[in-house]
Amino acid sequence: MTTSTPEASAADSAAKRRGSFHPLAVADVRRLTDEAIEVTFAVPDELHGQFDYIPGQYVALRTQLEGKEVRRSYSICAEPTPGEIRVAIKRDLGGLFSNWANDNLRAGDVLDVMSPAGAFISKHQMTSLNRPEDIDTDNEDVFVAFAAGSGITPVISIARTVLAANDHVRFDLVYANKAAMDVMFVEELADLKDKYPSRFALHHVLSREQRISPLLSGRIDAEKLTSLFDNVLRTDDVDEWFLCGPFELVQLVRDTLAERGVSAEKVRYELFSTGEPTKPQGSIGRPVEVDPNADNFAINFRLDGLSGTVASPKHARESVLNAALRVRPDVPFACAGGVCGTCRAKVVSGTFEMDENYALEPEEIERGYVLTCQTHPTSDEITVDYDA
């Protein structure tokens, strides 16, 4: 039986709220590895309420590069701290924003930062926004996380928070990287191990370096994962699982846990890419030409109390988000790939198809919510509500 508390209600509200951008100054840029930085944004007093967050959430960053608007989402990497937001940015091959940030971002620069969002958070009563002292400290909870590369970013935020606030928590982390030099937050993870030696277990798996244990060397494939579950991790006493990394790893762990009888309700996951990495994802939507006399869908949407309508050619198979952006550039979105959930809205009327979903919970879908970046109308008219 689940009971509602003010803290839980506040956390749910923060997880589902629609984000809005605010200009924030960079307070510090710290080098984590040769390919990654930690960026700290200063949050002024008047915006503290807009930037409350729960461990595991993310923010979207927006700026102009090469004459175009670019948006990227990054998970918050620190436990809730009023007055600041910290994210880690790792270079991505061909990544316009990540490479620019690693090469050019400096203290004093100003970027548009979206208020925190995302549902990669514990279903336990972990925190009341920026009050980690409100965590539920009565339960002897066991958490296990799998992270790869920059997938450590939200996981370390969660681990830091629960270990500090609850003396009964145990936390196992399997962290996969190519080599030791690629490990982000290596000192912070070592500090957690030193601080909580009996409650925090850290398992580094390196795919391109030989470690003493063969189990911790090489890629995590089905065979290695089975060995980890058989010899290192127990699946029957874990209260919650956190998985963050590339699609292939996250899906492998999810499938293996399901085969071992672990309830899907205990598994929280987040991707930093979808299963279709070559699928184009624009920052401001793709151009679509509309012939008023042709066969079009009518897409109606409500945002900030205002209603709008846009025609969308049936042959274009345009997403609801793309169509809405053509008449309202302030429609909320970040990844446009079905991963982050920023473009969430409720279908009020009409029928549709949703291509991918890596962000919405089953109960949200049952209540009519969709990711508008992945949603295409199948009826002549569809109405969605971003305010719902």
Image: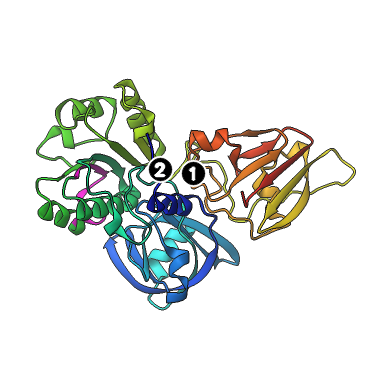
For the rendered model, the colour scheme is rainbow
Q: Residue furthest bottom?
A: 108
Q: Decide: marks 1, 2 in contact (CB < 8 A)?
A: yes
Few, some or many residues within 10 Å of mark 1 (<14, 14–19, 20+): many
Q: Is disc 2 surrounded by few (<14), some (14 to 19) or many (20+) residues within 10 Å? A: many
- Whether the magenta-drawn stretch holds residue 236 is answered as no
Residue displayed at 14% across by 45% down: 199
Q: Is residue 117 above or below residue 299?
A: below
Q: Is residue 173 magenta?
A: yes
Picture layout, residue 362 above or below residue 286: above
Identify which residue is drawn at 13% across, 40% down.
211
Secondary structure, mark 1, is loop
Q: Amino acid at mark 2?
A: Glu
227 or 132: which is nearer to us?
Answer: 132
Q: Which residue is mark 2?
A: 270
Depth check: 168 or 150 in front?
A: 168
Front-lying residue, 91 or 284: 284
**Residue 167, numbered circle:** none
Quadrant of the rendered structure where residue 171 is?
top left
Q: Nearer the viewer, residue 249 or 361?
A: 361
| Residue linked to disc 1 | 339
State how far apart marks 1 and 2 are (Cα).
7 Å
